[in-house]
Amino acid sequence: MEFAELLAALALKVRNQREAIQTEEATKNAFIMPFISTILGYDVFNPLEVVPEFTADVGVKKGEKVDYAIMRDGEVQILIECKKSKEALKIEHASQLFRYFAVTNARIAVLTNGETYQFYTDLDAPNRMDDKPFLVLDLLDIDETLLPELRKLTKDVFDLDSIINAAEELKYIGQIKRTIAAQFKEPQDEWIRFFTTRVYDGAFTQKVREQFTTLVTKATKQFLNDQVNDRLKTALGSSAFSPLPVSAETASLTSQLVVADDLDRDTELDTTLEELEGYQIVKAIACSEVKPQRVMHRDAKSYFAVLLDDNNRKPIARLHFNGLKQKYLGVFDQDKVETRHAISSLDEIYLHADAIRESVKNYNG
């Protein structure tokens, strides 16, 4: 599985099991050890790579330990402090990390509850862990722009210098994005005042503030909706007008097959954003085998089809989302027999990546 697929699979495990996790030890076993082994690629059972309950020889209080230390060439590179799942992470939880960061060679410290991972380094002062993380990974809401930087910490491609060099930009971009998201959700007075004073010439009184709080909240929500709708229109438009490769097989289609294809398209269709997002996931998986422009989609009343070369005789997958409480992903074997798999979220499509790729290979061999 690809790096993004592994992360999506772990995110799915967290979603499915988080309500059953009641202790810190259960969090470590269910979520954090799989993250260290599956995502970062270190052997949690090899003390030369991962040391649980790590204790430094000098410089810290007796009895204090860090939950995990990741080693490379005999030196500590990453320190990990764990908290119970669903427990909010606070900088006060990181006291051991602060002390151990100063007395080891570690340049990366991680505070996590198995769902959220906060990555720290020493941008503000050498050998002193920063108060704010430079990277925050939330498995319940993965920001895919962070994956290239996260991958630099994996065993196979460990590139500490590169991630440290990028850390300052990551830190401030991440904080800005989280601040904007918070303002969109619950705008503060400064946010309201910022927009009000740019469109309203009168004094910013209490009455004006109350009026524009409602208006700014509405405007920001409408702005987000407009952005989503624009993406939807773009996706539909690009799919509708993309030129298709013309092969000898396509040119020799009989009128009977063309009519059958047309009938299969159905009328009065309602393509949803969720279907398009699912299509993008299937397309991303299929693109390991073929060029992106060959992976197309067609909507129908009963399913949303992903096809190779926009050809109904080359189905890659089907999304059965329309009006169903239980969603299904349909995948095809070499005889074009469809098998439906129940899914509860789009991330679960990644669990069937091998079947999707195999389906493409069957037509592309």
Image (cartoon, helix red, strand yellow):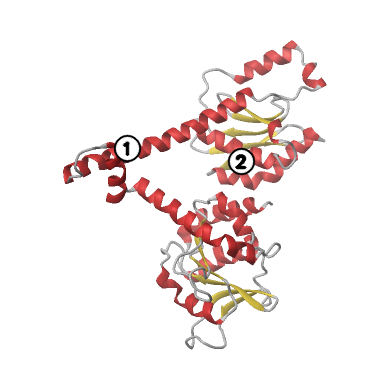
Q: In which quarter of the image is the C terminus?
A: top right
Look at the picture and state if 106 lies above or below 3. Answer: below
Please indicate, yes or no, whether residue 71 appears anywhere in the rendered image. Answer: yes
Q: Mark 2 points at which residue?
A: 281
Q: Position of residue 327 (x, y in %)?
A: 54, 38
Q: Name the residue under label 1.
A: 218
In which quarter of the view is residue 210 placed?
Answer: top left
Q: Where is residue 190 in the image (x, y as percent from the top left)?
A: 29, 50
Which mark sits nearer the N-terminus, 1 or 2? 1
Look at the picture and state if 289 lies above or below 153. Answer: above
Going by the picture, which residue comes out furthest to the top? 255
Q: Which of 175 and 362 is in front in this view?
A: 175
Residue plotted at (69% across, 32% down): 293
Q: As shown in the figure, which amino acid type bears the numbered disc 1?
A: Lys
SS of the residue at dot 2?
A: helix
Q: As shown in the figure, which amino acid type bears the numbered disc 2?
A: Ile
Look at the picture and state if 143 lies above or below 282. Answer: below
SS of the residue at dot 1?
A: helix
In which quarter of the view is residue 106 placed?
Answer: bottom right
Kindly check if marks 1 and 2 are in contact, taking CB atoms under 8 A apart as contact: no
In which quarter of the view is residue 316 placed?
Answer: top right
Q: Position of residue 144 (x, y in %)?
A: 56, 49
Residue plotted at (61% across, 23% down): 240
Mark 2 closeness class: few <14, some 14–19, many ≥20 residues within 10 Å: some
Please indicate, yes or no, whether residue 35 appears anywhere in the rendered image. Answer: no
How many numbered marks does the figure carry?
A: 2
Q: Position of residue 1 (x, y in %)?
A: 69, 52
Question: Residues under labels 1 and 2: Cα distance?
Answer: 31 Å
Residue plotted at (53% across, 51% down): 142
Q: Nearer the viewer, mark 1 or mark 2?
A: 1
Residue plotted at (71% across, 63% down): 156
**Residue 319: assigned label:** none
